[in-house]
Amino acid sequence: METVGDAGVIHQADAGDAAYDFVVDDVSKVFAGATRVQALSNIDLRLKRGSFTCIVGPSGCGKSTLLRIIGELETATKGTVQINVPQSKTPRSAFVFQEHGVFPWFTVLQNVAFGQQMASVGKKEREQNARRWIAEVGLTGFEHSYPHQLSGGMRQRVAIAIALLNSPRLIIADEPTTALDVTIQGQILFEVQKLCRETGTALIWITHDLAVVAGLADRVAVMYAGRVVETGSTADVIGHPMHPYTHGLIASIPTPESRGRPLMQIPGMTPSLLNLPRGCAFRGRCPRATDACLAEPQPEQVRPGQWVRCWHAGGPRNP
Ligand SMILES: Nc1ncnc2c1ncn2[C@@H]1O[C@H](COP(=O)(O)OP(=O)(O)OP(=O)(O)O)[C@@H](O)[C@H]1O
Ligand SMILES: [Mg+2]
């Protein structure tokens, strides 16, 4: 029996997939246009309602593609996305994109009420619902303001209210707050997570900034070159990163101790998805790389619920 607030789990397929609301099984995606892009390779992901998963990884590693597939905006080339949520009045997923989804010529109230136009709800009820969600995201008093009269963070809250008001089972937020300052990002994230917990909505949040979600997400999935290279509870991944890329990512977060010292940088560039190297895609930048890395690393469970794709996970040559 699933319970609201259970942490989502991302790991290799297991027997109990029916217990999860969203099951991504061995998903790969190839964009085969003028050039062939291997955008995703063998992604496994399990999500439960009420859970908060953060996806982090460098630009172009496939984060948005993965979320578009989960949100049914794109089809997978291989593998399946199983959604164990009845297609009823409740939409299965809603997206929050950066600077998207708010009409400039509508007031806040009109924007939020419009979000339910498609549902068969009367005008009065629509407005009542809209006012409720406007209050939930802390915008009471701004119902009749136009988006240009709001700050970036407030506009983002409008988009979040629109995403939440139809009670989707999953909210997919694709770097929705990167344009905002860190304090506001944290505040919005905190509020969205609270609302998702209360309503049992699962939340996936893409970010470049692991520090922003570190204290809030239940689980973290680290992507690199179209693969999930490490996943686990946020505490495990941040406290004991086992993949050298995750290790570098965390070492590059500024901390009070690192003040005045140069932050660690991962040398080299992310490989092109047009022409992926043989074996581990990170090996060209990796201080632990050996000949073993010429073969593709398979996922290994290093702690309960923490999976890593690395032949030298946390190994002797820890950078
Ligand atoms: N419709 C498409 N047609 C062809 N290639 C695509 C398409 N959409 C994405 N790609 C390619 O797939 C790869 C992954 O793109 P994606 O947008 O998922 O990356 P991302 O991790 O979200 O990057 P960013 O952090 O910059 O948003 C990129 O190489 C991109 O060029
Ligand atoms: Mg993206």
Image (cartoon, grey):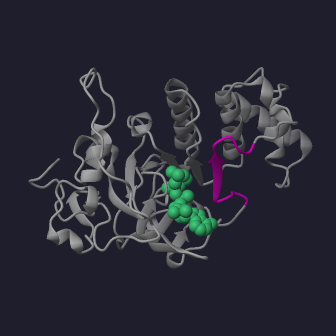
Q: Is residue 93 magenta?
A: yes
Quarter residue 139 falls in: top right
User: Which residue is found at the position 32% from the left and 65% from the top?
Assistant: 281
Residue 9 visible in rendering: no
Q: Is residue 187 left or right of residue 289?
A: right
Q: Is residue 233 left or right of residue 47?
A: left
The overriding secondary structure of the stretch rendered in magenta is loop
Quadrant of the drawing holding the N terminus: bottom left
Position of residue 141 measured from the top left corner of the image (x, y, whole percent): 77, 20
Q: Is residue 319 left or right of residue 27?
A: left
In front: 254, or 272?
Answer: 272
Quarter residue 188 falls in: top right
Span colored in magenta: 89-101
Q: Residue furthest right?
A: 123
As drawn, 151 above or below 118: above
In front: 35, or 319?
Answer: 35
